[in-house]
């Protein structure tokens, strides 16, 4: 019985689970943005930034 009580009181690995959930939520948001019209606009803007070269202040 003590083994079962200790198992439920053990909190090791909880932080890892929390980080995994946060990473999963970030991944879901990233996929949602990529599949939305914002994804197309973001892709266009990034492509323009990489092909235009560095901006030189005048």
Image (cartoon, helix red, strand yellow):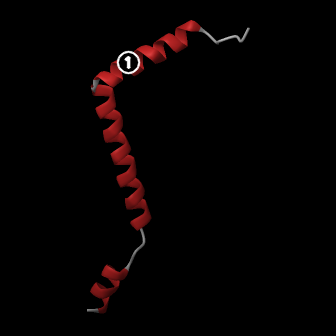
| 30 is higher (above) or lower (below) than 2 | above
Q: What residue is rendered at 36% in x and 35% in y?
A: 30
Position of residue 39 measured from the top left corner of the image (x, y, whole percent): 34, 23
**Residue beneath disc 1:** 41
Q: Quadrant of the C terminus?
A: top right
| Rendered image quadrant of residue 11 | bottom left
- Seen from this angle, which residue lies furthest bottom? 1
Q: What residue is rendered at 42% in x and 55% in y?
A: 19
Q: Quadrant of the N terminus?
A: bottom left
Position of residue 23 measured from the top left corner of the image (x, y, whole percent): 39, 48
Q: Callout 1 environment at 10 Å: few (<14), some (14 to 19), or many (20+)?
A: few
Q: How many marks?
A: 1
Position of residue 53 measured from the top left corner of the image (x, y, whole percent): 61, 9
| Rendered image quadrant of residue 10 | bottom left
| 46 is higher (above) or lower (below) than 29 | above
**In the structure shown, which secondary structural element does the residue marked by tag 1 occupy?**
helix
Position of residue 14 measured from the top left corner of the image (x, y, whole percent): 39, 67
Q: What residue is rendered at 40% in x and 18% in y?
A: 43
Please indicate whether residue 37 sits to the left or right of residue 54 in the image: left
Between 14 and 38, which is closer to the camera in this rendering?
38
- Seen from this angle, which residue lies furthest front? 58
| 46 is higher (above) or lower (below) than 32 | above
Q: What residue is rendered at 35% in x and 40% in y?
A: 27
């Amino acid at each position: 019985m003590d083994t079962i009580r200790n198992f439920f009181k053990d909190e090791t690995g909880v932080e890892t689970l929390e980080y995994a959930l946060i990473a999963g939520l970030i991944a879901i948001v990233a996929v949602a943005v990529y599949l939305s019209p914002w994804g197309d606009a973001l892709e266009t803007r990034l492509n323009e930034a990489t092909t235009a070269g560095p901006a030189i202040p005048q």
